[in-house]
């Protein structure tokens, strides 16, 4: 239906968006690449010339690299497992007939809208503080020694905080998927004698498969760049340095721009790999 | 017989659902409570906290000391500004993609969505340098410029989501601002240095920081799902 005239008009209308995105993406990207091949220490001598792939090698062989990768995988993996499993359970629960369903939904969804910085601080001080925190009072009430959450169990604490923030996201999406399930199939199965667990395993779960995949992929992309929660709770101490945080430290704290930029390139490659998977799924849906 | 079973089912489901909901919501509920208590009361055991006197002192002190409203207006300007700019640019693009689709339309849309997945940390330093060169470090304009390209793809899906994301955005706002343009994320982060007993003030500050977005988010749930999953889940 598109005439020659409207085609060129359309192209003009897309231009600002494309140009802005391209510019906003390419310019910093090129600069990062540029820096990654140099030795650049703003505080200790400035631009010290080209060093080829030196920074890339140094970044991967630094003693903090593999621990950071492990930390990142642990946090992302831990949060994914918790949010998907609990998300499915919660979605099933919220799908039931309940009085005051709207209010319960609001309560369950709320954590997602809390700023990560607020979330980190609230959990760190009001709940996990070993002297005055809520958990400390609770532990003492039962006669036990309060746990030093963020110093002794820093990874579980972080995973807990981040899971609390992202559980609503998983729940919302899975709930939407469950509610799109045709109830006729389930009713037919029930009439044929299938027990609740069987109905869940063979009908509901496969239907959820796509939604679960979407949740996992999108969460992975966002979780890989988690920053604020770590920044305000442990600042990377006690083994909570993720890849993102390591790069941030290299660039802004130790001011080794070349090294940090190389790390940034690694992060970009990683994120793109995940993104390719997601876009394939989204693309399939766009056609359907 | 069948009716009784369904009502009993509903009652049990309701009880469990409410319990779970309250547990999840509890941290937010708790800081709302704490924000209305004095510092001395805020650190006591939960039972004592609940029975102590209510006060709005903490809110007053927080506003006095760290100027909530300046940060609030910064957040508003940055979040709304980048979203509006994004709309200006994205709506024509979305219109043409919807009504005059070409062979490359899908590819372009996919590429646009993929730019949202560029990890910010990868380009932190160049942007930081650029901002210093242009003199826009610690400026609202600077934040709007950075957040606008992030807003464009999302606007193809939903506008509200972007206001929320920009509002809560911490990576750029924490690293690119100091005093003049610091939005609420920095406002809260400034409470992370240890200075003794300050639960009530931190709670008040936190409630003030998250209240606007909580309200907005509650109103936009359905759109949120579509927007967050880029339409992958209907």
Image: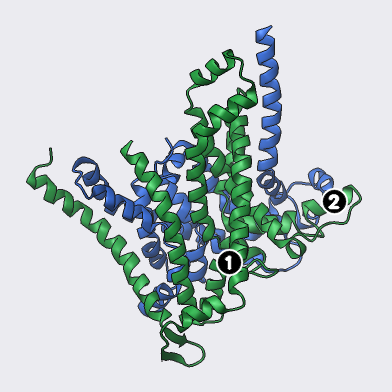
User: In the rendered image, is residue B177 in sight?
Assistant: no
Chain B's colour is: blue
Q: Residues within 10 Å of mark 2 (few under 14, many from 20)?
A: some
* Element under disc 2: helix
User: In the rendered image, is residue A202 in sight?
Assistant: yes
Q: Position of residue B176 (x, y in %)?
A: 47, 70
- Check the residue under mark 1 and report the chain it is in: A
Q: Which chain is green?
A: A
Q: Is residue B196 above or below residue A281?
A: below
Q: Which residue is mark 2?
A: A139
- Check the residue under mark 2 and report the chain it is in: A
Q: Is residue B136 above or below residue B53?
A: below
- Which residue is more in the foreground, B85 or B63? B85
Q: Residue furthest left?
A: A4
Dividing the picture into quadrants, the one containing residue A156 is bottom right
Left or right of residue A254, residue B226 in this image: left
Disc 1 + disc 2, Cβ < 8 Å: no
- Which residue is more in the foreground, A69 or A103? A69
Q: Which residue is mark 1?
A: A69
- Which residue is more in the foreground, B6 or A67? A67
Left or right of residue A257, residue A85 in this image: right
* Element under disc 1: helix
Viewer-nearest of discs 1 and 2: 1
Residue at 43% x, 82% y is A53
């Amino acid at each position: 239906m598109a005439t020659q005239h409207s085609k060129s008009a359309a192209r003009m209308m897309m231009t600002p968006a494309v140009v802005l995105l391209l510019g906003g993406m390419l310019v910093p990207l090129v600069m990062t690449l540029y820096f990654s091949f140099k030795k650049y220490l703003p505080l200790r001598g400035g631009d010290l010339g080209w060093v080829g792939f030196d920074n890339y090698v140094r970044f991967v062989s630094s003693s903090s690299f593999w621990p950071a990768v492990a930390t990142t995988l642990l946090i992302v993996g831990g949060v994914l497992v918790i949010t998907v499993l609990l998300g499915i359970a919660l979605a099933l629960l919220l799908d039931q007939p309940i009085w005051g369903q709207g209010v319960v939904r609001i309560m369950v969804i709320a954590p997602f809208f809390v700023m990560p910085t607020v979330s980190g601080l609230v959990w760190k001080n009001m709940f996990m503080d070993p002297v005055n925190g809520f958990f400390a009072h609770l532990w003492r009430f039962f006669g036990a020694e309060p746990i030093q959450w963020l110093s002794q169990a820093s990874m579980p604490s972080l995973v807990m905080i981040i899971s609390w923030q992202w559980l609503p996201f998983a729940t919302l999406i899975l709930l939407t998927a469950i509610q799109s399930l045709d109830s006729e199939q389930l009713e037919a199965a029930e009439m044929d004698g299938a027990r609740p667990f069987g109905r869940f395993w063979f009908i509901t779960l496969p239907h959820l498969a796509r939604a679960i995949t979407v949740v996992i992929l999108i969460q992975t992309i966002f979780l890989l760049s988690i920053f604020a929660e770590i920044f305000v709770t442990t600042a990377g101490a006690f083994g909570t340095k993720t890849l993102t945080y390591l790069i941030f430290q290299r660039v802004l704290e130790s001011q080794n721009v070349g090294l940090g930029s190389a790390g940034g390139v690694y992060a970009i490659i990683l994120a793109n790999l995940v993104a390719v998977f997601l876009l394939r799924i989204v693309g399939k849906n766009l056609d359907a | 017989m069948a009716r009784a079973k369904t009502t009993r089912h509903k009652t049990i489901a309701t009880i469990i659902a409410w319990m779970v909901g309250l547990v999840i919501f509890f941290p937010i509920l708790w800081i709302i409570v704490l924000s209305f208590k004095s510092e001395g009361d805020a650190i006591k055991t939960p039972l004592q906290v609940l029975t102590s006197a209510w006060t709005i002192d903490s809110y007053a002190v927080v506003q006095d000391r760290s100027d909530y409203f300046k940060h609030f207006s910064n957040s508003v300007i940055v979040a709304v500004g980048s979203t509006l700019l994004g709309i200006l640019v994205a709506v024509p693009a979305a219109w043409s993609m919807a009504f005059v689709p070409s062979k490359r339309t899908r590819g372009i849309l996919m590429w646009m969505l993929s730019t949202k997945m560029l990890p910010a940390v990868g380009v932190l330093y160049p942007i930081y340098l650029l901002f210093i060169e242009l003199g826009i470090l610690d400026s609202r304009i600077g934040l709007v410029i950075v957040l606008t390209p992030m807003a464009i793809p999302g606007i193809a899906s939903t506008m509200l989501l972007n206001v929320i994301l920009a509002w809560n955005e911490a990576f750029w706002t924490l690293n690119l601002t100091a005093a003049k343009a610091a939005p609420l994320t920095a406002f809260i982060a400034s409470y992370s240095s240890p200075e003794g007993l300050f639960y009530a003030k931190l709670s008040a500050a936190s409630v003030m920081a998250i209240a606007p977005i909580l309200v907005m988010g509650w109103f936009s749930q359905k759109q949120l799902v579509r927007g967050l999953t880029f339409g992958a889940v209907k």
